[in-house]
Amino acid sequence: MANDHHFTWHGTGQSLLEAKLRAIDEARLSVRFETFYFSDSAVGLRFKSALTAAARRGVVVRLIVDAIGSFALGRAYFDQLAAAGGAMRWFNELQLASFSFRDHRKLLVVDDTQAFVGGCNIAPEYGGDGITAGWRDGGVSVHGPIGAVLAAEFDRQWERAAGRHWAFPHGGMRKGARAGGAPEVEALFIKPGFGRNPLREALWQDLATAKDVTITAAYFLPPHRLRNQLAQAVARGARVRLMLAGISDVRLMQLASRSLYRRLVHNGIELWEYQPQVLHAKTIVVDDIVFVGSSNLDPRSLRINFEVMLRIQNASLAEAVREQFEADLAQRSIPITGDGLRQGRSWWERLKQRLAYWLFARLDPELAAFKLQAWRGRKDRLVRRVRRVRSVLSRRAE
């Protein structure tokens, strides 16, 4: 198929945030913006001002912010945007039944043709190079038909954010922007539930024939089957390398990830920890395919949150992402070896790691599954009640 998309790789949080601000400033028709964490800060003010200015010049501006991720943000913070004609919704305000299920997506779509995905929230810690200052993060901007696909999914999330009893989808969705043949770009929409997961499905397919795999993961706790596939790829002769967090903003998740290190190294997977700053990036390169977006390889992202990833088959983009990975490994990371693991873990450290693994891999998903079942049961009861009322009204009308 013809190449209908243009990609720009943003290897730092600063680059991605500045590119988003420029796109908002240049918007002519619409801005759809979705984020997990929006901070009351200098960078937060820049984004709020850019969105407000766009609304004032007649651009249709819609903003979704997760209510728990941005819990500290005052509920009047976006009043200026509303006064200018923009619209904002909090996603999933605090309620016990659905507390677990968060909108973790970081998505910007401008004029239905330009889209940005990545790991960056709107906060000062993302505004650096990830080496001397700021967290190590980034993402990609895409010009092309996939923008309309992402815009349509944003609109579905906008409707979910409007009600207290939005329906839980039974699985995610994998949708490409086609112009004949296989799509160059696919949007992978992960949604709460324990059924179909488009990121897992795509990875399973691509890893089956992989020759070179690089993974940069802020939080790494993948399901057993995915770990097996990585090991099988190595057994077939592929090279599999992981760059994980040497410094993490979630210490318990780091402990849980480290509980897997011995098995990963034993299976021939090469492992490094990134040293200069907190690692928050989420990228996977499988040969000439790039996965990038908001999803971590952990149970919360894969089974509980709303997430968005792009699967992009583009050799030039894959080369750019891999070049950054190589530089990070060579200059800014330390290798994790079998000898080091045998010498470096006390019984107390191993116990902490196993407890952390149980918390994230077992307890959190089980609680989410229980809440999901209860939520669906309550929704089913509500549907039955509505049907009874409609039936009574229909009989009376006769």
Image (cartoon, rainbow, N blue to C red):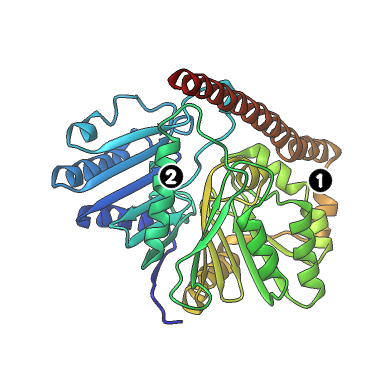
The front one of 244 and 317 is 317
- The circle drawn on residue 156 is 2
Element under disc 2: helix
Crowdedness near tag 2: few (<14), some (14–19) or many (≥20) residues, C-alpha within 10 Å: few
Q: Residue at x 44, y 42 (%)?
A: 157
Question: In the figure, is residue 195 to the left or right of 344?
Answer: left
In the image, residue 187 lies at what x, y percent?
50, 60
Tell which circle, 2 or 1, labels the residue nearer the N-terminal end.
2
Residue 79 appears in view: yes
Q: Residue at x 63, y 67 (%)?
A: 214
The front one of 167 and 367 is 167
Element under disc 1: loop
Q: Please state which amino acid type lies under the numbered disc 2.
A: Arg
Tell which residue pokes out farthest to the front in this image: 398
In the image, residue 131 lies at what x, y percent?
47, 56
Residue 128 lies, with reference to residue 356, above or below; the image says below
In the image, residue 271 lies at what x, y percent?
70, 61
Residue 162 lies, with reference to residue 12, above or below; the image says above
Question: In the figure, is residue 27 to the left or right of 216?
Answer: left
Q: Please state which amino acid type lies under the numbered disc 1.
A: Arg
The quadrant holding residue 29 is bottom left
Q: Which residue is mark 1?
A: 345
The quadrant holding residue 42 is top left
In the image, residue 374 lies at what x, y percent?
66, 26
